[in-house]
Image (cartoon, rainbow, N blue to C red):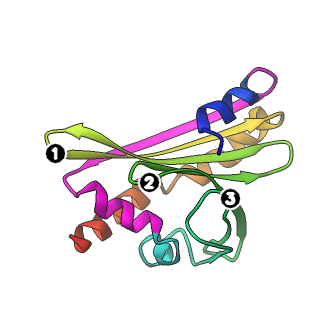
Amino acid sequence: MISLEKFVSEYRGASGMWEYEYSAETAVASEALWRCWSDMEAWPEWNDGLDEIEIDGPFEVGTAFTMTLPGGDTVRLRLVEIEPGELFTDEMDGGDFTVVTEHRLESAGDGLTRVVYRTEIIGDAADAVGPEIGPDITADFPDVVAALIKTAQALG
């Protein structure tokens, strides 16, 4: 398992990078949020940016999955980092660029949890590709995080 920090640091010196981060705080228990994330088969039930998901194994590092987006486009990713109850990271290999998305839960104090979605596009083509596709990839982060929180809240 390679950490996101180490993975990104290997690319920063010789290539470009594009990044975006969105976060929201909630009183919903982090355990409930994690249950939603780790149940990949249920993602399309609460994430309107996903029509279908096909998973090639359990929720563990190395598992590949294909997401079908509204409109029929598909994206192939794999899980590259998991710290149970805290974060998971997936990546999409675009050849001369890689899209890395970290999904993280942090304590925000006073019983609150901060839900963080962070995407970095790294690699030789990142400077050109990032501004083109990055905003499309991350545009729904506020809606996805709100839906995650609402779904986790219903779980209790």
> Which mark is in front, 2 or 1?
2
Q: Secondary structure at mark 3?
A: loop
Where does the image place residue 87, in percent across and percent down from the top left? 46, 49
Q: Mark 3 vs mark 2: which is more N-terminal?
A: 3
Q: Is residue 148 left or right of residue 53?
A: left
Question: Mark 1 sits on what residue?
Answer: 111
**How many neighbours does mark 1 have within 10 angstroms: few (below 14), some (14-19), or many (20 or more)?**
few
Q: Mark 1 vs mark 3: which is more N-terminal?
A: 3
Q: Is residue 103 left or right of residue 68?
A: left
* Image disc number at residue 84: 2
Q: State which quarter of the image contains the C terminus.
A: bottom left
Q: Secondary structure at mark 2?
A: loop
Residue at image point 25% right, 73% down: 155
Q: State which quarter of the image contains the N terminus.
A: top right
Amino acid at dot 3: Gly
Q: Nearer the viewer, residue 73 or 96?
A: 96
Residue at image point 20% right, 45% down: 112
Amino acid at dot 2: Pro
Label 3 – label 2 distance at C-alpha: 15 Å
Circle count: 3
Where does the image place residue 79, in percent across and percent down from the top left? 63, 57
Q: Is residue 27 left or right of residue 151?
A: left
Residue at image point 41% right, 73% down: 46
Question: Mark 3 sits on what residue?
Answer: 62
- The span picked out in magenta is 13-38
Q: Is residue 14 left or right of residue 8?
A: right
Label 2 – label 1 distance at C-alpha: 19 Å
Label 1 – label 3 distance at C-alpha: 33 Å
